[in-house]
Image (tube, rainbow, N blue to C red):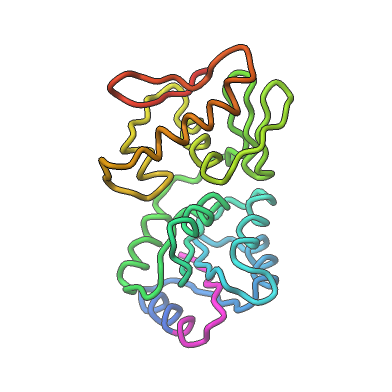
Amino acid sequence: MKLLVIEDDCTTADYIVHGLRQEGHVVDHVADGRDALGQGMNDGYDVLVVDRMLPGLDGLSLVKALRAAKVATPVIFLTTVGGVDDRIEGLNAGADDYLVKPFAFGELSARIQALARRPAAATQETVLSAADLSMDLMRRKVTRAGQEIDLLPREFALLEQLLRRKGRVQTRTMLLEAVWDISFDPQTNVVETHVSRLRAKIDKPFDSELIQTVRGAGYRIDG
């Protein structure tokens, strides 16, 4: 594989590059985000390994710019910024995976291999829709019937999760894992609270309801 490592810490970069080359990969290294943007657009890489804290252009902005330019190369963030909100932010920006430092090289290698095995998408879906509701993932913009709707980050992530699986039931556990990175917590009502807030914004002001409650199962968005 041909890989691009975008990392400004020399010690970490040398460790990753050396290990990947020992596995037989062709590996380039860039330490500056702006340099990485041009290289990521122009060279045919199989996977990009990106740190979030970069000089010139931070990793989050770098990935957003690549996705806006229709570059679909798989991206894995490798960073010390590891909070739940940070991971959600990174994945929503267009990354395919997220690994927090300190890390085991074997896990990084396995994740890179997994990303490379994914079939390449002919076109990357950047706009999700249901009936008269539209979500532009690149512009972070949601509209219904032509009216723009202001969503908080968690509300946006919840709506995106429902739209990506339009017509299919999402259980409470599935939503907790996807949006809040919580595997199981029977005590929290965070899903119910956010679904209610989301309905107040995208359903209540309009003639029809898109978010459906499937009793005993979860939630589904139709349209």
Q: Is residue 90 above or below residue 133?
A: below
Number of callouts: 0
Residue found at the far top of this picture:
207
Question: Residue placed at 36% from the left, 42% from the top?
Answer: 176
Q: Say if the magenta span includes residue 113.
A: no
Residue 105 is situated, as x and y percent measured from the top left of the image, at 34, 74
Residue 64 in picture, x, y percent from top left = 64, 55
Camera-side residue of 39 and 201 = 201
The region drawn magenta spans 1-14
Question: Which residue is at the far bottom?
Answer: 11
Q: Is residue 178 left or right of residue 157?
A: left
Above or below, 145 relative to 174: above
Residue at (50% x, 59% y) in the render: 86
Position of residue 71 in the picture relative to residue 86 (left or right):
right
Residue at left 70%, top 66%?
38
Residue 148's place in the image compared with 39, above or below, is: above
Report the residue at 40% width, 40% height from top. 190
Name which quarter of the figure residue 141 lies in. Answer: top right
Q: Nearer the viewer, residue 216 or 57?
A: 216
Q: Quadrant of residue 42?
A: bottom right
The quadrant of the image that shows the C terminus is top right
